[in-house]
Image: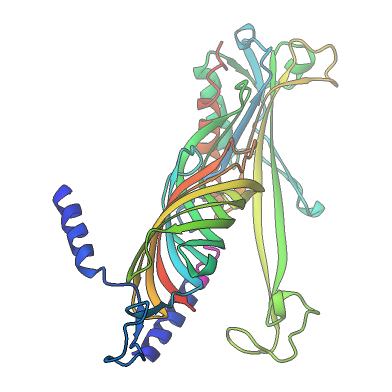
């Protein structure tokens, strides 16, 4: 594993090239007096970025559902302040978790009531956040860290026999994130990230205090 | 290359958006009845020793003309299952209704079935499937087609077992329920399947109520 990481870093070093830069040849005559600056350069980096991702999620710290979601996604928009390394933006994600539970007994707290059934549990999450990102550098490889806060809408369902019990609620959301983007050309590139979503959605009915998951996403970005 | 990239981008985008709400797969759910029980925690089941259990099960439906009773031998499987469980827990059965009036029986077990026929209608071809919200230009997945409706019908059933506390009741009109079991779910069109599910459910109801013990 350690070797693999070193190999990956070495490989990354090989790929990192200079920032997308256009060098303008000096109009100053070569045999004239030397100008103050030796070379005129300007750098064009994108100011806006739109990303669309497929996302998978691994639920953590929940007794309601434990199986991964492979049918999620996220769209996000970033605006680089003055075209620099700091960006602000907004994101909208979604995930659907579902899990079959074999027949078991569910009892009330005082153990007077009991229900025995199998069930399919389903959790749908829709996190909406405003984010701030810091890009370490923006060359053909762009690693970044980010932090988002916002709100999360969630639905929890329990299906059994032909019946269903629904709950839906809103919670406060916080999501730290690390990511890496790979440039294809000036406009397009690949995007990948890992984030931890923590939301305060709670349901007394299903005994849920919060909903949290590790989310891994991969997608394409468009810069302009 | 650029065209290909854009095309790939569009396909990817559509694939992602298509996953916006993934409905769960309910194919693995069993059709066995859901078994729910409720007990009065103040009751000491060891202070009772006899119970009255009729071999007749009352059937209540949402169509008055179909209300009826189920008698032996149709009711045998369910009644025998109840009797076997009660006897195993140390109680003695009585089959004489007078034992309730004379209070010779400590517990009266009532068995009822509620059978409900559900019907409905689903329409296709209208926007949102609601008649009236017409989509005049007929856009959407398969394009416009003339609206049509289908009807559906299914039965749900609930088997209810109730333990009436005869021993501690002053009159037979006001009997306190000590224990209730409600077993419910969708019904099969085969009666034998429904009987099998009911027998399994009764067994589970006693299994999850170990406090019923003389």
Residue A112 screen position, x and y as percent: 63, 22
Residue found at the very far top of the displayed protein: B47
From the viewer's perspective, tell me whether residue B82 is left or right of residue A183. Answer: right
Q: Is residue A44 above or below residue A191?
A: below
Residue at 65% x, 55% y: name it. Answer: B155
Q: Is residue B23 visible?
A: no
Q: Is residue B158 above or below residue B125?
A: above
Residue B210 screen position, x and y as percent: 52, 19
Residue at 53% x, 13% y: name it. Answer: B90
Residue B16 screen position, x and y as percent: 47, 71
What secondary structure do most residues of the magenta stretch adopt?
Answer: loop
Residue found at the very far left of the displayed protein: A3
Q: Nearer the viewer, residue B46 or A23?
A: A23
Does the magenta run of residues contain B20?
Answer: yes
Residue at 50% x, 64% y: name it. Answer: A74
From the viewer's perspective, tell me whether residue B172 is left or right of residue A9. Answer: right
Q: Is residue B79 visible?
A: yes
Quadrant location of the C terminus of chain B in the rendered image: top right
The colour scheme applied to this rendered structure is: rainbow
Q: Quadrant of residue B143?
A: bottom right
Residue at 47% x, 39% y: name it. Answer: A103
Q: Nearer the viewer, residue A161 or B165?
A: A161
Does the magenta run of residues contain A52?
Answer: no
Q: Is residue B174 above or below residue A81?
A: above
Q: Quadrant of residue A107?
A: top right
Residue B35 screen position, x and y as percent: 58, 36
Q: Which residues are magenta?
A: B17-22
């Amino acid at each position: 594993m350690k070797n693999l990481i070193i190999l990956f870093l070495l490989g990354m070093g090989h790929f990192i090239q200079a920032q997308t830069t256009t060098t303008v040849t000096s109009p100053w005559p070569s045999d004239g007096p030397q100008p103050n600056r030796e070379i005129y350069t300007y750098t064009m980096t994108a100011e806006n970025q739109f990303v669309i991702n497929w996302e998978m999620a691994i639920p953590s710290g929940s007794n309601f559902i434990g199986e991964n979601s492979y049918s999620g996604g996220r769209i996000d928009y970033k605006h680089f302040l003055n075209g620099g390394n700091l960006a602000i933006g907004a994101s909208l994600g979604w995930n659907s978790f579902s899990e079959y539970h074999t027949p078991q007994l569910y009892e009330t707290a005082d153990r007077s009531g009991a229900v025995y059934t199998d069930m399919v549990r389903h959790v749908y999450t829709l996190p909406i956040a405003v984010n701030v990102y810091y890009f370490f550098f923006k060359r053909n490889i762009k690693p970044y860290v980010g932090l988002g806060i916002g709100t999360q809408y969630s639905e929890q369902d329990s299906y059994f026999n032909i019946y269903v019990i629904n709950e839906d609620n809103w919670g406060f959301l916080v999501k730290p994130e690390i990511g890496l983007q790979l440039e294809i050309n000036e406009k397009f590139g690949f995007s990948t990230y890992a984030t931890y979503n923590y939301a305060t959605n709670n349901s007394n009915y299903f005994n849920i205090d919060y909903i949290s998951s590790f989310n891994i996403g991969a997608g394409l970005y468009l810069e302009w | 290359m650029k065209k290909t990239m854009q095309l790939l981008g569009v396909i990817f985008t559509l694939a992602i958006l298509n996953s916006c709400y993934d409905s769960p797969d309910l194919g693995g759910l069993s059709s066995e009845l859901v078994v729910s029980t409720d007990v009065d925690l103040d009751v000491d089941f060891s202070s009772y020793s006899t119970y009255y259990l009729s071999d007749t099960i009352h059937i209540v439906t949402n169509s008055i003309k179909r209300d009826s009773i189920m008698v032996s031998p149709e009711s045998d499987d369910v009644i025998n299952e109840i009797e076997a469980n009660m006897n195993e827990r140390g109680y003695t059965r009585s089959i004489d209704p007078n034992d309730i009036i004379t209070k010779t029986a400590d517990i009266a077990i009532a068995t009822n079935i509620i059978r409900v026929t559900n019907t409905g209608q689903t329409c296709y071809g209208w926007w949102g499937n609601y008649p009236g919200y017409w989509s005049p230009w007929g856009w959407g997945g398969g394009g416009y087609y003339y609206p049509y409706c289908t009807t559906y019908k299914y039965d749900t059933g609930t088997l209810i077992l109730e333990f009436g506390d005869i021993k501690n009741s002053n009159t037979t009109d006001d009997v306190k329920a000590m224990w209730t079991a409600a077993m419910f779910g969708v019904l099969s069109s085969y009666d034998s399947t429904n009987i099998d599910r009911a027998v399994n459910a009764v067994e589970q109801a006693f299994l999850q109520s170990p406090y019923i013990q003389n």
